Amino acid sequence: MKRYIKQLKYKPLVAMLAMAMVLPACELDDIPDPNNPTVESLLQNATVDDLNNLVVGTVSGMRNGLGTYYDNVGVIGREHYRFSGADPRFTSDLLGAVNATLDNNTFYTTTPWSTRYRVVKNTNLLIEAVNNTELITEEQRQAYLGFAKTIKAYQLLLNLTMMNENGIRLDVEDPDNLGPIVDKATALAAISELFDEAAAHIAQAGESFPFPLAGFSGNSTASGENEFFDEPAGFLKFNRALAARVAIYRGNFTEALSLLEDSFFDLTAPFDRGVYYVFSTSPGDQLNPLYFAPNAAGEVRIAHPSFIADIAPNDDRATKVSRREQAATQSGLTGQYDVALYETNTAPVPIIRNEELILIYAEANIQTGDLGEAVRALNIIRRGHGLQPYTGPVTQAALIDEMLYQRRYSLYFEGHRWVDLRRYNRLDQLPIDRAGDDVWVNFPIPFAENI
């Protein structure tokens, strides 16, 4: 019985490598199928081509379930409403309507959880294969390990973002003997350590990767030079950027500043410089799941009314939403603006970009007492969006308010507002649109994980 890497199935938690095929009992049984490599063939002396197929599958799998993830964190964070003609749970469960609660055994909980762990399974397989082959150079080995551990850490972070205090599993290498669910602090510490391990590998990976990375191609810097995140030097900066995000989640603001120095953070570079999920209309590829056509009916994402109500005059981030020809209404909720962050169904979606790093820099300086430097960073964001320089009180409390405003509008519909207000114990500031609605703090651990 051989396990073929063609289609991924999964147990309650993680992807199980493809359904076993029973071959006829004949002399050809032990000859590998070149079109459907087995797990066994990968785990012993995998070639560069074998390993690169795993890398491509991993990058592709990172895009799965994104629509549900962004709806989860965006709806609870009152960034948008998700109106669906097929499923009322977007406006009931996610908003806590009447007696509704978050369900631990339905798509909005299980889909993001399982899709992230599918990718983790791929990275674990890649790590094992790399460590069991003699057909690659040492620099190549370090490259694969650095990539795999970076992506693994990022996938675990996304699941922890949803589960929050309920925690996640870290040890999932053996699907038949899963490790325990650990608490948030333990998980964040382990994710931070994994990013550091990956960085050490990448530093030894030479000047180029032996594999392609869709979405990691060049971005122009302030000097006009290209920076390529699909090469070790650039990918290391991507790793350090994500690690800086984890550092502020842990409240380690001095560490965040240090990590930014090794990332692609640049106060003078374009805000959109960074790494993205990419999509296309090519056969077998995926479309951007966050795009809906303007003025659509049935399946729509409607900007929360507070987005326009609270935005400052002349703030050009108002263009992240577009006024509908006719207001949309469902379940007692009404909105006049579509979420309009993406203009086409192939537009790229950011994983992390320079604008977030500038805001991390501002936050870390606020929290470490360099308020003047924080104001300088915040003014770069303000001027970049048509606003005059900050003139409010230069106090920690006032600058935290300012920083959270800038994060709200700069990072709109990028998965941050719910997390940010939760980090600052401000979820009670989110609007309640209907009597009896709730603002959730955590998603429940999927039901199947408790069996």
Image (cartoon, helix red, strand yellow):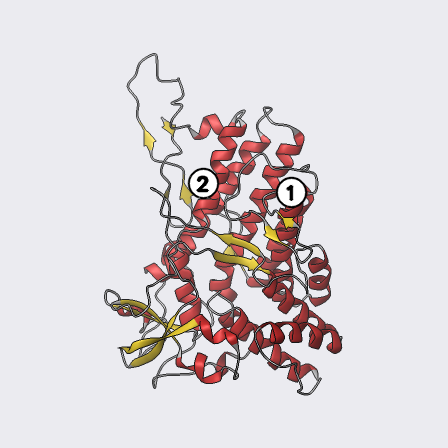
Q: Residue at x 37, y 61 (%)?
A: 291
Quadrant in which residue 391 is drawn: bottom right
Q: Are marks 1 and 2 in contact (CB under 8 Å)?
A: no
For the residue pair 401 and 372, the one nearer the viewer reads as 372
Q: In the rendered structure, which amino acid carries the disc numbered 2?
A: Gly
> How many C-alpha atoms fall within 10 Å of the one at disc 1: few (<14), some, or many (≥20)?
many
* Residue 57, disc: 2
Q: Residue at x 49, y 29 (%)?
A: 42
Per the image, the residue denoted by label 1 is: 232
Q: CA separation, marks 1 and 2?
A: 19 Å
Determine the secondary structure under disc 2.
Answer: helix
Q: Position of residue 66 (x, y in %)?
A: 41, 57
> How many C-alpha atoms fall within 10 Å of the one at disc 2: few (<14), some, or many (≥20)?
some
Which of the image's four quarters has the N terminus?
top left
Determine the secondary structure under disc 1.
Answer: helix
Q: Report the mark closest to the observer, 1 or 2.
A: 1
Q: Is residue 126 left or right of residue 287?
A: right
